[in-house]
Amino acid sequence: MMNGDMHTLCKRYLNYHIKAHMQNGMEYEGIITDVDERNMTLLVPEEVGEEQVGRDGDERQFGYRRFRRFRPYLFPLAAVGSMSLVPFFRPYPYPYYPYY
């Protein structure tokens, strides 16, 4: 894909959650926050475990808490091979429970 085509695609997907496939085979998932003629800025989520945050001493019955921290990364547009939107599916609309 040409550099100008990737720039227009990044402009169209600005502030959307995408999956970027680089030309070297790496895949990155994140939100496009900024695009210029040569680079794009992507907010990439990082998993943060319970041991990195600190323990409060109380045990929960639902397992460990999960946190995601987003960090900005700068990628050159020439290195991006293709992009696709990450689909989010709506849950099936269940009917309301009848109250008696």
Image: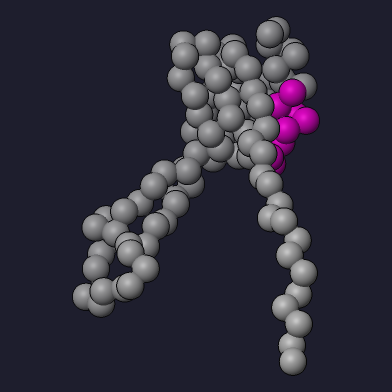
Q: Quadrant of residue 43?
A: top right
Q: Position of residue 26 (x, y in %)?
A: 46, 19
Tell me: residue 25, above or below residue 88. above
Residue 76 appears in the figure = no
Judged left or right of residue 27, residue 31 is: right
Q: Which residues are magenta?
A: 9-16
**Where is residue 44 drawn, in percent x and y?**
50, 39
**Image height of 75 relative to 42, above or below:** above
Image vertical order of residue 88 relative to residue 83, above or below? below
Judged from this view, the residue extending furthest toward the bottom is 100
In the image, 24 versus 37, the foreground residue is 24
- Residue at 58% x, 25% y is 20
Residue 59, image x, y percentages: 26, 74
Q: Is residue 79 magenta?
A: no
Q: Find out whether residue 14 is within the magenta segment.
A: yes
Out of 98 and 4, give the one closest to the viewer: 98
